[in-house]
Image: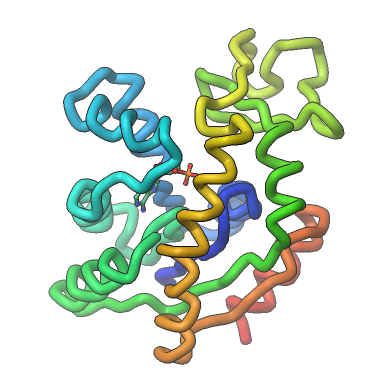
Amino acid sequence: MILVLLGPPGSGKGTQAKKLVTLKSWPQLSTGDMLRSAIKQGSKLGLEAKAYMDKGSLVPDAVVVGLIGERILLQDCKTGFILDGFPRTISQAESLDQMLASVHRKVDRAVLFRIEDSELVRRLSGRRTCIKCGSMYHIENALPKSGGVCDQCGSKEIVQRDDDFPEIIEKRLMVYHQQTAPLVEFYKKQAKLRSVEAARLPDQVAQALHACLIG
Ligand code: AMP
């Protein structure tokens, strides 16, 4: 199955994608993670992308389309994959359809994560991220078990991501409503859209997401 997870930043797409990866054999393709990894490596692409990401803007379509275009051809994507954070514009969605059509494939389903902006601001502003492995924590209810040490990789570098500061969060939400939300209609027209109520506990969202994959 080729699955698109659609929803604003902080709606839990990444968390649910990771849960699905452990259940199914489909990899999680997160353009945000790919770009952060390029930044960490100090590549030219990473440096270019950072300027956009730090402002809360979208990285140009050609950059992310190029990244995804190469990634979906790899062997581990043969039986399916989960797109997390891509596409984010109509133009990206059209490019995705074209790339898939050229290898006789198509998006099977898009699932929208429904959630209020006020809840997203609470989630994102309290979010803390492990620089080393990307594990996420929250200052209100999900701190690492032992002080500032990452539960997953033992790193002590758990920080607030540059784009999780209030002004940037506001910008990212505005960008979502202007540029990404139109994808809801795009996938509705193709009769591929389902949706889940995302302001719930991760296990409850996971259950709803499974139902979307079957029905
Ligand atoms: P995320 O981790 O998915 O919230 O992405 C973090 C940032 O990476 C976004 O705010 C954008 O600047 C950039 N980004 C990630 N995915 C895309 C995409 N599909 N198109 C453009 N920019 C993206």
Q: Residue at x 25, y 25 (%)?
A: 47
- The quadrant of the image that shows the N terminus is bottom left
Q: Is residue 33 left or right of residue 199?
A: left
- The residue at the far right in this view is 141
Q: Is residue 28 left or right of residue 115?
A: left
- The residue at the far left in this view is 102
Return the residue nearer the eye: 45 or 170: 170
Q: Residue at x 59, y 22 (%)?
A: 130
Q: Is residue 37 above or below residue 171?
A: above
Q: Is residue 17 above or below residue 114?
A: above
Q: Is residue 98 left or right of residue 10?
A: left
Q: Position of residue 48 (x, y in %)?
A: 23, 31
Q: Give the number of callouts.
A: 0
- The quadrant of the image that shows the C terminus is bottom right
Q: Quadrant of residue 207?
A: bottom right
Q: Position of residue 113 (x, y in %)?
A: 63, 65
Q: Quadrant of residue 56?
A: top left
Q: Position of residue 198 (x, y in %)?
A: 72, 62
Return the residue nearer the eye: 24 or 73: 73
